[in-house]
Amino acid sequence: MTDDGDGDPSGSSDGHPERERTGRWLTAVAITLATGSTGVYFGRPPLLLAAVVGLAYTAYPLVTTEPAGTLALSRAVDDTSPAQGDAVTVTATLTNTGSRTLPDVRFVDGVPPKLAVTDGTPRCAAALRPGESATVRYAIEAEPGTHRFEPATATCYDRSGGRRVETALAVGSGSGRPDGANETGGTDGAEESDDAEAVSSLECSVPVEGVPPPRRTARATGRTVVDASGSGVEFDRTREYRPGDPADRIDWRRYARTGALTTVEFRPDRRRSVLVCLDARPRSVRRAGDGDTDAVTAGGAAAAAVATALLDRGARVGAVRLGPRFELVVPGAGRHHRERVTTLLTDSPDGPRAPSDGDDAGTGSATGLDGVDGSAVESDPAEEFTGQVDEVLERTGGAAEVVLVTPLLDGFGVDAARRAAERGRGVATLSPDVTSDGSLGAELAGVERHNRIEALRSAGVPVSDWRVGDPVRWSRVDGGAR
């Protein structure tokens, strides 16, 4: 079991709980007033006595204390890197670390939005004495991508049920008192989790058996030897001194020995630069069937895996998200850069829903501008997204290769690859297959997608025809590096 003990303060509302009155006793107040008024009007002492008793009940919420307490959340999973379709058991524990009893606590764990709960429940209700805990255990089905747990929600009611305090809790953090101080004088459980293993997400990675071939996209990954001379660390040659040459490049030992001025040149150290472009247009948010992963989510997971593999091989990698939310991370390296690239590629799809390939709207969009019945369907503004491709090519260096991740459900991917190739870029394509044979329109979409793949391959563009759940590979015919 791995303890998810690293909280994310930015994702929690700790210290700013929502407080409100539930209005639970408003009905009792109305009945008490009506009984008392009736007793006065008709001169009935029993009714007045009943109103006095009811008044005592309505005053009860006023004398109870607010449900102030300190809660700490911990979460554990049995596998932080599951495979596609694996069931992952999650255990979340809510602990009352304060000195007061919480008579009514309602708790809901922050299940990752894209993952479905297949067994158990992430909810519970309990009364917690100081030091007591409540635990929920449930199973979720792993899907490709990096899935981040959301802050859990803890709602505390007072003894009367008339007031409640709702707080969002990140793992390893705690909820404070109204003045923001911890009742026990600690730090809301944060200190206890500092030494715990930091696991803030569930990553279902896509296996990568090869990377795009270089310079169709370049012939080697990592550092590449070039013919040009210049600044670097590997000696290349010496030449005669020219006015303006830097003094630190003069071979002073040779000058002291022979009196001749010569300049030392080195072989430049140039690393492969790759730009991974994810087609996240609304038209690309398609699924093969109900319950399957959509093309943008699956493609983003595969794109992140390819980017990670390239970074591990020493390449400089950037990322682009093409769609309504256009974002660009220029090629770079390093741990923080890797996190930026992965986050950009694995974010939620930009579309409102992911229709399956068998849906009417989905089938129409997957087969072109016209639906199966010949009726027109709404299309994406192609000029806008084509302009995004041109902007990416202009803003990145001419030596940066392009790996385009697109389901090829329309001609956008072919056009984008052609534009990159025309500018001298090495291009490769990774295409998640979300087509099916469930209907005539779906079969037609599959045929058209296959034709686009063949068109790219005939133009010399390596294409990885990838089915979700399989490893990503480029065939030897495409020149893929295994």
Image: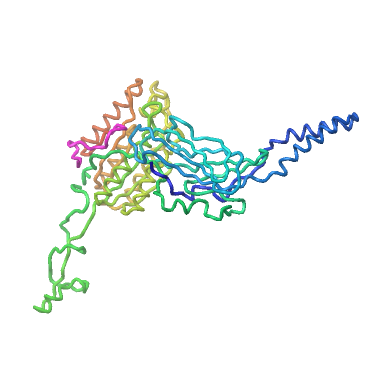
Say above or below: 192 vs 282.
below
Query: In the image, what residue occupies the spot 31% across and 32% down?
Result: 469
Image quadrant of residue 201? Answer: top left
Residue that sits furthest to the right in the current view: 43
Q: Position of residue 214 (x, y in %)?
A: 21, 46
* Residue 295 appears left or right of 17: left
Start-end of magenta stretch: 466-482
* Residue 254 appears left or right of 243: left
Q: Where is residue 291 in the image (x, y as percent from the top left)?
A: 40, 28
Q: Is residue 226 magenta?
A: no
- Residue 281 visible in the displayed image: yes
Query: Residue 411 or 247: which is nearer the viewer?
Result: 247
Image quadrant of residue 378? Answer: top left
Question: In which quadrant will I find the C terminus?
Answer: top left
Question: In which quadrant will I find the N terminus?
Answer: top left
Query: In the image, what residue occupies the spot 71% across and 36% down?
Result: 25
The secondary structure that dominates the magenta segment is loop
Query: Residue 315 or 370: which is nearer the viewer?
Result: 315
* Residue 404 appears left or right of 73: left
Query: Residue 469 or 152: which is nearer the viewer?
Result: 152
